[in-house]
Amino acid sequence: MNKSKALGPDIQNLYTYSELPIGATAVGLPEGRETGLWRYMRPTIEEKIPPCQEACPAGNWIQRFVDATASGNLDEAWRALKLENPFPGVCGRVCYHPCEESCIRKEFDVSTFIHLIERSLADSFFNERLTPPIIRKKQDKKTAVVGSGPAGLACAYFLRVLGYEVTIFEARNELGGIPQTGIPAYRLPKEILNKEIGDIIALGIEVRKGCRIGKDMDFSELFTYDAIFLATGAHQTPPVNIPGVTNEGVYQGMDFLARYNMESSIDVGERVLVIGGGNVAIDVSRTLIRLGIQPTLLYRRTRSEMPAHSEEIDDALAEGARFQYLLSPFSIRKSEKTGLILECAKMKIQGVDPDGRPRAVPHEGKRVSFEADQVILAIGEVPDFSYLPKEIDLIKDLLWVNEWGQTSVEKVFAGGDMIDQPWNISEAIGSAKRAAIAMDHFLKGDDLQNLFRQGALAKTMREHLDLDLSPEPGHREVATFNDLNLSYVRSFSSQLSGKLPTVERICDFREVNSGLDLDAAIKEAGRCLSCGVCKMCGNCYLFCPDGAVQINPTTGRYAINYQYCKGCGICQNECPVGAITIEAEGAM
Amino acid sequence: MGTHKMLTGNYAAAYGAKLARVEVTPVYPITPQTHIMEKMAEFIENGELDAEFVSVESEHSALAVAIAAQATGARSFTATSAQGLLYMHENLFVASGLRLPIVMVLVNRALGAPNSIYPDLSDSLDQRDTGWIQVYVENAQEAHDMVVQAYRIAEDKRVLLPMAICFEGIIISHYMEPVEILDQEKVDNFLMPYLPEHVILDPDRPMSVGQIVMDDSYYMEYRYQQQEAMDRAKEVIQEVDEAFGQSFGRYYGGLLSTEMMEDAEVALLTLGSLASTARAVVNHLRNEDGISIGLVKLRMVRPFPDQELSELLSDTKVVVVLERDVSIGAGGIVYTELCRSLNGRNGPHLINYILGLGGRDVTFEDIKDIALLSCSERHTTTIDNPIRWYQVRGL
Amino acid sequence: MRTLAETLPKEELFHSGHPLCPGCPGGMMLRWITKTLGKNSICSMAATCMALPAMVYPHSLEIPCLYIAMAPSPAGITGVSAAIKILKRKGRIPADRKISVFALAGDGSAGDIGMASLSGAAERNDDGIFFCFDNEAYMNTGIQRSSSTPRFSWTTSTIKGKPEKKKDLPRIMAAHDIPYVATVSVAYPDDFVRKLEKARDMEPGFKYLHVHSPCPTGWRFPESKTIEIARLAVETGLWILYEVDHGSLKVNFRPEKRRPIEDYLRPQGRFRELSQKDIQSIQDRIDNRWRDMRN
Ligand SMILES: Cc1cc2nc3c(=O)[nH]c(=O)nc-3n(C[C@H](O)[C@H](O)[C@H](O)COP(=O)(O)OP(=O)(O)OC[C@H]3O[C@@H](n4cnc5c(N)ncnc54)[C@H](O)[C@@H]3O)c2cc1C
Ligand SMILES: Cc1ncc(C[n+]2csc(CCOP(=O)(O)OP(=O)(O)O)c2C)c(N)n1
Ligand code: SF4
Ligand code: SF4
């Protein structure tokens, strides 16, 4: 590939002494020997999936935006981020960031703080309109989205990106779903949420607020749309089997939060009991603290089994919430003198539940009672399916969808808390994206079943829109610790983000976590190991003794020239990110 | 007209190099050559010659530097003697194999042990297989003239071989003689600047100089090219001698020169300073005694004038080779070369006198004795003991 | 910040298809050198493995290259640069044309047979860059001991391990008080190229770069590990990356914590027979050396 110019006589093909150049010189520079014939090991540039990306339920293009951030290319970072997620400001704050759990850097020192980088990027672009990096030309099809929580809004966004007309139907007068009504402002400031919602709507999405399907409009009217996405979440309180739950002064956690968040006023007494161990219970408790009340939280198992996020439990404790464990509500009575009396059964841990969690069982019938002005129950909600036509199948308490989010009715898709998946924002976004991609194929008349079987159904926009230029995407493995060469990792400590001091936090609803400023975020991004993804460090190119690794001018990426590669394996050994594999020549 | 000066052979040679406008001169001191080095340094230091003087750390490097400089396109010049020459040995082959027309003055000196600074031509004759053209001169003037001629011979496109000008240390190198220093302008007309095309380290024409040939690929062909160049050098040497004579009025005869050889029955064949003495003897014996004797002054040992000698000596009865060198176990080196030249033909008897080694004086009388003795052998059918060490004490 | 791979010229003047062993550190070194010095350079080559791609047909080096003999590659610098000087004065080479002259020699030719030539060219401060390709033995002739072979190392001429210590050539060269002496390693291309650029752009004079070059064939380690071994030499503190710029010494890389020398020795077959005592003695030497380098 690199020498076709023969500058002099090809002495190998000369026959007579008089044709030879004089003086034992040679000027010929023909093709070199085909040293590729020496090779018995064959390296392949084969990128892998970074485990963080694999772990991100929303399908963020983490490596790309982090790498771009690290190199100070913020526009590029922002484009990569926006392509896959319309809620970086929200996710950067309240997503539980499973990406960081799987971060390989953890095994070297500390995980890269991906969520803080995401948040910092979002914050630094706060004053700019979020336009997606790409909007496909207008498609001649109309779509409807029911519910404007993270799932509904994300689906609307992706459908817009794909060129479709979108109408959102939302029962409430505010868009946003639980992040709007449930998540308190000290975790997710309203202006952040509303800015991102505003950016989505500004793409030209029609919004019908105050329109509850099944009440303000019949489901059947939706069938005028070419495809429909359902994302009405889980907002219904299941029947609670505790005597006295209907007493005045007993609230549902979600209602309590919605009322405070939407109306900013609620009457609370001095003594408040919160029942439950999940995020709702914690958010209720911390809201109460900010209202000047020191709540007591009662939970039927122990701290280690609490489903709430550990960091938030710590925050609640630091802020002054009292926790009592191994207590299960038994009855609520009204008392003239003291308001409410909550009687609880004492529990103990014995064996495990079918879901694998330690099981709490009553402890020899022991009871304790608490006096309270209010009792707030935060023990879970279920979706409301009453508005759906019966052709749409359910499975257990949830809506049935297939792998790409299609319900039993062809043109109806669904995602978010309605379907069988973990209930959180990034899952909601991920399910919305998968559905939007499937809807795109559906609206084009593609055979989804077939595409799925061939593995041609993308889960991310970058794949769907063919923007990921890495070689052979799709057939990739997830990078592991052993794939990396850590010699190239500089050990520098992670950038620390701060929290408001507790004394300041409990006075109002100011945001508690402060995030990173941009410089710190850029530094933090520099800690990313780019697992499995070539970041053009050039090691293979520099270290190949045979000059067999060169940039392919069409892709701009490194490629191996097997005509000359001797198979030494140095490129594979020295690739810091593990994007090169090597196997015996001829092995498949 | 050039200017006349009393000069030693060394200085005369250095003046020749200066006139040839040599460009790079790497040299390492060794008696009896050192004065050449000193004079070159002085010329360059004074600004009389625009060149790079390199005071190298060994003769091996001296020749290596000359090779590198010549390969880069600069006219190179160096000089050495005896041990220094042998220290260069490896690189002598390189210079000729690379076809670099480097010119070197070899001031002959005996090789230790035992150590002596006096002459013995074995040091340079030893190197006759290295692919260099070798000329042996008999006095300072010839040394001076031949340095200038050498560049024109060596750089000729038909030749492109390095060339050595050899003369005896002390006897020629150190004794002053009147020398005509050539006129620079005339030398400039006689000798063009060195503008190589065949071998040149030029980034615009990248080439590997001194390639490694693997297996059986072309080693022999490269060697044969050298042989052919050496053969062609004969005619070039003649031509250059002719041209030099026309420009400067001195003719040296090219490969060899003769004195009264037309009808000579006995020929003295010698080289270097011995030729001067032998010439006087021949003149004397012819003029005073009417003896049919002539002189062959061998100038070129490489290329060896095989053809020329066998023609010249075809009617001669006895050829006496007088030489200040020896190949232990074989005889005088020139004698053995001559035997090869005449190659068993029914030609003259050959007698070899090894004499003057280590600078031992060889007088007019000595050569006259030898000549007369040889004349007496011209009618014998066989020559006993043709290789004779002359005047070895106790022999 | 742009990476070295981006900033180095893309053009390969040292071509693929050369006969060096798979994994040879010389292959990369030659690529970096030719990329950094560019077309306008002339190479003087010693007898070394490196001569094979440059001097054996078909050639892989697209710059003029001269092979004289094993010893006098430094004299090659002398001759070429002297010629360039005079030819520039005479106008046969344009006076403003910058031509980098460099020599490439193995440790055997630099430190043994060519030591006088090297020392001579350095002392005369002839203009050029000399690379000592230190693979710590005579590799081209089949792994024989050189003065640069480290103590205890197996070679075909020291089958029980070399009893003598390694000659410290860069220090000897620094003692020549030339403008620039630097130690480099194939595992640190940025450092390598930075130093080479410095040498290239310096005023005329003799510059010496000593390249630590793990040879998979001679050191007996898998060919994929060339860089790893080179890096270990630096991380264990055995090979110190430093430069002596006009007499002032600067250590360019001080490992935060030096790894034990055993990490470097163990993967190499040539050190297979080392006893714990031998290893300790090497470790002590390294520790002492760093104590000297503390400043
Ligand atoms: C208090 C609390 C805190 C949480 N904190 C976090 C957190 O920190 N991080 C995290 O990742 N997750 C958190 N979650 C979970 C997360 O909020 C949900 O998983 C996510 O909002 C689900 O999104 P969704 O779009 O499916 O539903 P929702 O957000 O519930 O949105 C559904 C929308 O549909 C509307 N709707 C309902 N029925 C109809 C109808 N018939 N017609 C029209 N519109 C209708 C609703 O008004 C609502 O706006 C929290 C949940 C709660 C309750
Ligand atoms: C005068 C001389 N002696 C011996 C040799 C044979 N020879 C060729 S290469 C070589 C070894 C070179 O070793 P080194 O300089 O360390 O370079 P390497 O091959 O290890 O790169 C030897 C001894 C030679 N070419 N010239
Ligand atoms: S470094 Fe070069 S020669 Fe070695 S395996 Fe990789 S591409 Fe092939
Ligand atoms: S023996 Fe060593 S230095 Fe020589 S070519 Fe092979 S790997 Fe390179």
Image (tube, coloured by chain):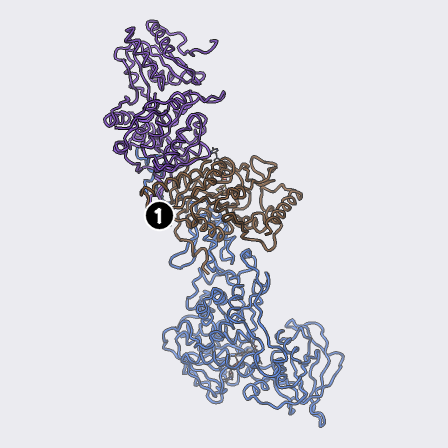
Chain colours: A blue, B purple, C brown
- Foreground pick, A293 / A259: A293
Q: Amino acid at mark 1?
A: Arg
Q: Position of residue B122 (x, y in %)?
A: 42, 21
Q: Quadrant of residue A259?
A: bottom right
Front residue of this view, candidates A198 and A433: A198
Q: Position of residue A494 (x, y in %)?
A: 57, 66
Residue at position x 40%, y 77% from top?
A164
Q: Residues within 10 Å of mark 1 (few under 14, many from 20)?
A: few
Q: Circle 1 — which element?
A: loop
Vertical order, A11 against B339 (above or below):
below
Left or right: C102 as drawn, with respect to B300: right
Q: Nearer the viewer, residue A181 or C144?
A: C144
Q: Is residue B240 left or right of residue A69?
A: left
Residue placed furthest toward the left: B246
* Residue A46 seen in this snapshot: yes
A27 above or below C294? above
The verdict on label 1 being within 8 Å of ligand 2 is no
The residue tagged 1 is C97
The image shows residue A315 at horizontal and vertical percentages of: 63, 76
Give x and y (percent) for residue A514.
56, 75
The number of discs equals 1
Subunit that carries the residue with mark 1: C
Does A248 sit left or right of C173 as displayed? right
| Extreme-bottom residue of the structure | A336
Q: Against C250, is A146 above or below? A: below
User: Residue A289 occupies which quadrant of the picture?
Assistant: bottom right
Residue B46 drawn above or below residue B252: below
* Res B74 seen here: no
